[in-house]
Image (cartoon, rainbow, N blue to C red):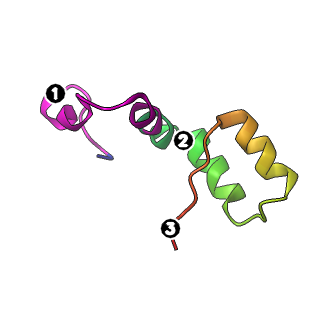
């Protein structure tokens, strides 16, 4: 849905029955700061303190699929 026109309701029909977690993910994935920070910590080991700081700041963490 990147680049979707937020004024065109038809482009958002899939979110009509979304659960809160899905709406939260839509917000996060569109947030430039979240995406930039997620990219920065993605390659770090799980025990790196920056991973914990990211989790405290944003809550959920979504790992890339391999």
Residue appearing at x 56%, y 52% in the figure: 62
Q: Is residue 11 magenta?
A: yes
Read off the residue under disc 1: 9
Label number found at residue 65: 3
- As rendered, which of 50 and 59 lies closer to the eye? 59
Number of numbered discs: 3
What span is colored magenta in the figure? 3-25
Pick whichever, 26 or 16, lies toward us. Answer: 16
Whole-percent x, y for residue 38 in the image: 63, 51
59 vs 52, left or right, is left
Label 3 residue SS:
loop
Residue 54 versus residue 17 in the image, above or below: below
The numbered mark, 2 or 3, whose residue comes first in the sequence reads 2
Residue pointed to by mark 2 = 32
* Viewer-nearest residue: 25 or 39: 25
- Dot in front, 2 or 1: 1
Q: CA distance from mark 2 to mark 3?
A: 20 Å
Q: Is residue 52 above or below residue 47?
A: above
| Dot 2 and dot 1 residues touching (CB under 8 Å) | no
Point out residue 28 in the picture as x, y percentages from the top left corner: 51, 38
Distance, label 2 to label 1, CA atoms, is 23 Å
Under circle 1, the secondary element is: helix
């Amino acid at each position: 849905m990147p680049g979707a026109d937020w004024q065109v309701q038809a482009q958002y029909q899939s979110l009509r029955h979304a659960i809160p977690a899905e709406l939260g993910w839509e917000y996060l994935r569109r947030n430039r700061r979240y995406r930039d920070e997620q990219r920065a910590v993605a390659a770090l080991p799980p025990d790196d303190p920056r991973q914990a700081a990211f989790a405290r700041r944003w809550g959920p963490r979504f790992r890339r699929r391999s």
